[in-house]
């Protein structure tokens, strides 16, 4: 077994010192005069501006009672304002002082190292759901860690609506049951958003206003485990701003159960795919994320630099070429679930980094792959949703009713395009010629359609397919019989010259899968790469380069093989009814936020946040 070694890091160079760029100076930190924190100069300036605004507002003359009932209370100063009237910055400063006071005046650690729990909330609800109203089980000790989502006080009673692991529960605190610290000292410093440890027993309240009480934990002791220093958006208005939800995903998860459900379903989808392949004797592998050549797909790569090797590298756009080299080596069924990186536009269905499943199986061809795909994807949908039928809503609210049950329709690309355009195409084995390119350019003019440059036969056919075929695919549909000029890694069709044995699966007008019988002739593969190089010379930045390492591997013999790729993010979108890919990524890539924009977001929060 090989011992573990420190991995090579492209950003942490070990080259001679003379080749090293000068190290960046450490960022200088400044003391916040109010909270005592060490913060950057930018953050300090932002806080100072916020405090100046708050001070000016506090010194302003009170409004007439008719205009503001809050002003009539005479609590304009930040120090005497009710906490629910403070802006986020004022609340943060006040909360920091409160927590600091716990340490200094009361010798309480607001961040304890450990709290022993013996129950998960989901198990608590299942086990004690049968308790009748007004009954309790005092002999059962419950110890849980939960986050406060709302709190209410009625005399000597405190009620907390709490949540953990997506499950909500009420914690009822009665001064008569309190143990440990005095009741007030346990509760007065608790605020919405705090993590607390609760020691108590299960029971159900007996309200006068309804027949069935609330299943609750009757607390004997409550311990602060971690304070929340910021105001949470109000439970009434919630957190709906998408920009803020994507940038502060932790806040989104705290407040929106639907976000949590989306990521749980994503995990189940990946788990099902992994288990499906494992059960069929596929071997999961990991291949390099950085390559000297960005091969395996037609896409623009991200470029980086390895200091120690003094080498330009590309973030991978697909793991295909490495996986097929493993098949050459005798790993006849392999797959990888991993991230790919493409330096392309961001829109509702594209993110620069995304997750795919790719597998390769020796002795499969395109027909085996279609049957395998139907079985795997339809089984996935049935397992995750409980049905073969799902509904997907687009951004404009259009509802697509999708039937995933096999068999799926199978459309031949070129005959379908000829029928849609009313035009007979040149022979497919001539698509690589300049005459064919002229034909397709004139066809675009004839049907009054444009294609973004560079104009190549491959790009034009892809444009036509999107307009006339893909746009009509709602339930999963195979589009097959691609021209070879569009598929440099696919094996030629055994019966139709110029076409290859490839298919794509489209659902709700979007591609979710791509597969083909793999090209295993090294001579033919080099020729295909050369055709791609010509397209790159014409300005097609997505065309692939010649990968001699891969071609050499083919010379050792790739058995007849079928390869398949699935976009996991899009599958999650369709099975969670999310029209934006950002909804199914935990941390989608976002534009950088300027200091001004950050301040605007803070001001917006101040208008919708209450304690």
Image (cartoon, grey):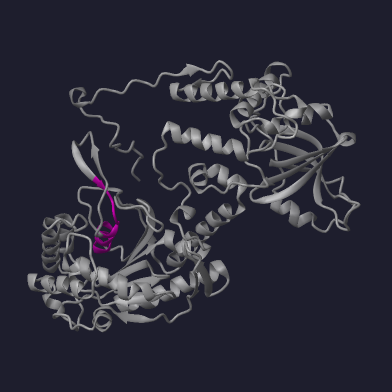
Tell me: residue 441, above or below residue 266.
below
Residue at image point 43% right, 48% down: 588
Q: Quadrant of the C terminus?
A: top right
Q: Where residue 26 sits: x, y (%)?
A: 37, 21
Q: Quadrant of residue 197?
A: top right
Tell me: residue 206, above or below residue 62.
below
Relative depth, front residue between 416 and 511 = 416
Relative depth, front residue between 557 and 263 = 263
Which residues lie in the magenta part?
A: 314-329
* Residue 455 visible in rendering: yes
Residue at image point 73% right, 25% down: 75
Residue 325 among magenta residues? yes
* Residue 65 as seen in the image, left or right of residue 431: right
Q: Quadrant of residue 23?
A: top left
Tell me: residue 21, above or below residue 522.
above
Residue at image point 71% right, 34% down: 67
* Residue 32 as seen in the image, left or right of residue 234: left
Q: Where residue 9 sits: x, y (%)?
A: 30, 36
Q: Where residue 373 sits: x, y (%)?
A: 40, 73
Q: Quadrant of residue 57?
A: top right
* Residue 82 as seen in the image, left or right of residue 545: right
Residue 199 among magenta residues? no
């Amino acid at each position: 077994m090989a011992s573990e070694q420190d991995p090579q890091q492209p950003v942490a160079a070990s080259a001679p010192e003379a080749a090293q760029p000068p190290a960046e100076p450490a960022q200088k930190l400044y003391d916040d005069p109010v909270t005592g924190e060490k913060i950057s100069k930018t953050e300090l300036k932002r806080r100072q501006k916020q405090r100046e605004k708050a001070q000016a507002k506090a010194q302003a003359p009170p409004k007439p009672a008719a205009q503001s009932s809050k002003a009539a209370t005479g609590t304009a100063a930040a120090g005497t304002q009710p906490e629910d009237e403070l802006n986020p910055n004022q609340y943060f400063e006040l909360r920091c002082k409160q927590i600091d006071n716990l340490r200094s005046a009361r010798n309480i650690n607001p961040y304890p190292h450990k709290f022993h729990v013996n129950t998960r909330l989901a198990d608590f609800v299942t086990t004690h759901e049968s308790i009748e109203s007004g009954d309790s089980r005092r002999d059962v000790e419950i110890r849980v860690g939960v986050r406060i989502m709302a709190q209410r006080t009625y005399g000597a009673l405190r009620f907390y609506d709490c949540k953990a692991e997506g499950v909500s529960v009420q914690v009822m605190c009665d001064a008569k049951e309190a143990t440990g610290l005095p009741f007030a000292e346990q509760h007065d410093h608790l605020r919405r958003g705090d993590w607390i440890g609760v020691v108590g027993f299960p029971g159900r309240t007996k309200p006068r206003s309804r027949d069935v009480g609330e299943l609750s934990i009757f607390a004997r002791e409550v311990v602060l485990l971690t304070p929340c220093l910021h105001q949470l958006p109000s439970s009434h208005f919630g957190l709906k701003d998408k920009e803020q939800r994507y940038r502060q995903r932790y806040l989104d998860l705290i407040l929106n159960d639907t976000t949590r459900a989306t990521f749980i379903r994503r995990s189940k989808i990946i788990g099902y795919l992994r288990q499906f392949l494992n059960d069929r004797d596929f071997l999961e592998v990991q291949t390099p994320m950085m390559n000297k050549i960005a091969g395996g797909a037609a896409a623009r790569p991200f470029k980086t630099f390895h200091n120690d090797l003094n080498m330009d590298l590309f973030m991978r756009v697909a793991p295909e070429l490495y996986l097929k080299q493993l098949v050459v080596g005798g790993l006849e069924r392999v797959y990888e679930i991993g991230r790919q990186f493409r330096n392309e536009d961001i829109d509702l269905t594209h993110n620069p980094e995304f997750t795919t499943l790719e597998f390769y199986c020796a002795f499969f061809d395109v027909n085996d792959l279609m049957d395998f795909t139907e079985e795997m994807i339809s089984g996935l949908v049935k397992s995750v949703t409980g049905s073969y039928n799902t509904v997907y809503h687009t951004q404009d609210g259009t509802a697509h009713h999708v039937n995933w049950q096999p068999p799926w329709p199978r459309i031949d690309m070129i005959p379908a395009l000829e029928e849609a355009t009313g035009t007979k195409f040149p022979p497919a084995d001539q698509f690589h010629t300049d005459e064919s390119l002229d034909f397709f350019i004139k066809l675009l003019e004839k049907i009054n359609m444009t294609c973004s440059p560079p104009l190549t036969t491959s790009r034009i056919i892809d444009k036509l397919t999107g307009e006339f075929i893909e746009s009509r695919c709602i339930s999963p549909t195979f589009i097959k019989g691609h021209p070879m000029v569009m598929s440099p890694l696919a094996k030629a069709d055994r019966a139709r010259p110029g076409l290859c044995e490839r298919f794509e699966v489209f659902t709700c007008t979007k591609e979710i899968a791509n597969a083909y019988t793999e090209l295993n002739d090294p001579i033919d593969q080099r020729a295909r790469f050369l055709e791609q190089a010509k397209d790159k010379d014409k300005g097609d930045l997505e065309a692939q380069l010649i990968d001699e390492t891969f071609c050499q591997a083919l010379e050792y013999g790739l058995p007849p093989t079928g390869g398949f790729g699935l976009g996991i993010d899009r599958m999650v979108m369709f099975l969670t009814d999310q029209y934006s890919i950002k909804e199914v990524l935990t941390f989608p890539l976002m534009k950088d936020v300027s200091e001004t924009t950050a301040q605007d977001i803070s001001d917006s929060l101040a208008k919708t946040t209450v304690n």
